Amino acid sequence: MIHSAQLQVSERKKSNYACELIDNYKRNVMCSFTAIAAIAAVATVLMCIFAIVPNSSAFASTKSTDGLPPKGVIVTAFQQNWKSIAKECKQTYGPEGVSYVQVSPPQDHIKGTAWWTSYQPVSYNLNSKLGTEDEFKNMITTCKAAGVGIVVDAVINHTTGDGNKDTVGVGGSKYDAANQSYPDAGYTKDDFHQIDKDIYTYKDAQVVWNYRLVGLLDLDTSKPHVQKILGNYFAKLLKMGVAGFRVDAAKHMCPEDVKGIKEAAAKAAGTKPENIWWMQETIGFPEQDPKIQPDQYVGTGEVDEFEYSYRLRNY
């Protein structure tokens, strides 16, 4: 199932941690209400984004366990903290009929207050600049009581830049980027691709999958050990009551790797892969390698469709 574009931003930062922004730092906002679609470009502020969720068998677990509808409006609460989201669920999102809130990555990450720090994990502990694990759990419970499901933005392609000199994440996790050691995540140097080069072309899938995305250490997601760690992370979130996931930088991983991670998550959570709501960020352009196009990932779940918004804008 192809999903409407939600946020035209790749979660990166230039220099050591490059920020790849689309269309001269503009954000496209997609609103879809049944047959009506509208787009607006936002230049300086990241806003909440609404999108109608398509029908999909992936909603089976959400519908049966949470009592939430298989369709609905998603609000992307980009960089909104857990206490604030819980409050909004009670006061606004629930009463206004919002079905889901997509939250920023909840795992521990490098220090700093900039939005892109959330996209450089140092472990999968749930203490971050957006709140503690207890606050995260309370947000899920509060929102669910208001009829709102939580969708988590999951960063699983990489960790931090190798030039990061810190040794402790904002949530207290220890790491050593220079030696590719992330003990609180369970990673050693053997868990990373050892190609010390950035992605230089999107016309070769092997480069996209195995080279570093703007200097970020690239996990070897083909390895069972890595898939198990990531699967356990997803399973922990599912057991907390999370409704689904947005998988960041999906096209930077081989589709078979993504499938393996989802299967590991299902096994750890005691469910089937098709019962996990799984939306994948796959920004595809015709001139890029066919192997990294959105249609290569639909067998694993839904994909964010970015080209649709560009065409609407230029119509």
Image (spheres, rainbow, N blue to C red):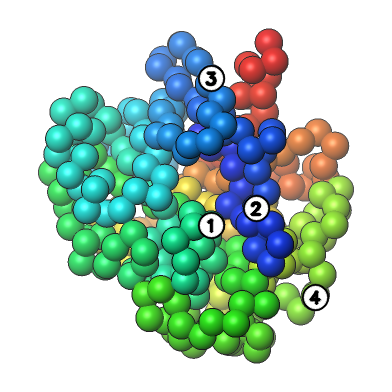
Residue bearing the label numbered 2: 19
State the residue at coordinates (21%, 40%).
Answer: 88
Residue bearing the label numbered 3: 39
- Decide if residue 148 is on the left or right side of residue 37: left
State the residue at coordinates (69%, 35%).
Answer: 24
State the residue at coordinates (22%, 53%).
Answer: 83
Of labels 1 and 2, earlier in sequence is 2
Q: Is residue 9 above or below residue 129?
A: above
The reply to whether residue 231 is in sight is no
What mark, if any, has residue 196 been given in the picture? 4
The reply to whether residue 279 is in sight is yes
In contact (CB < 8 Å): disc 4 and disc 2: no
Q: CA distance from mark 4 to mark 2?
A: 19 Å
Query: Which residue type carries mark 2?
Result: Cys
Neighbourhood count class around disc 2 (C-alpha, 10 Å): few under 14, some 14–19, many 20 upward: some
In contact (CB < 8 Å): disc 1 and disc 2: yes
- Decide if residue 311 is on the left or right side of residue 123: right
Query: Which residue type carries mark 3?
Result: Ile
Residue bearing the label numbered 1: 116
Of labels 2 and 3, earlier in sequence is 2
Q: Nearer the viewer, residue 276 or 162?
A: 162
Q: CA distance from mark 3 to mark 4?
A: 39 Å
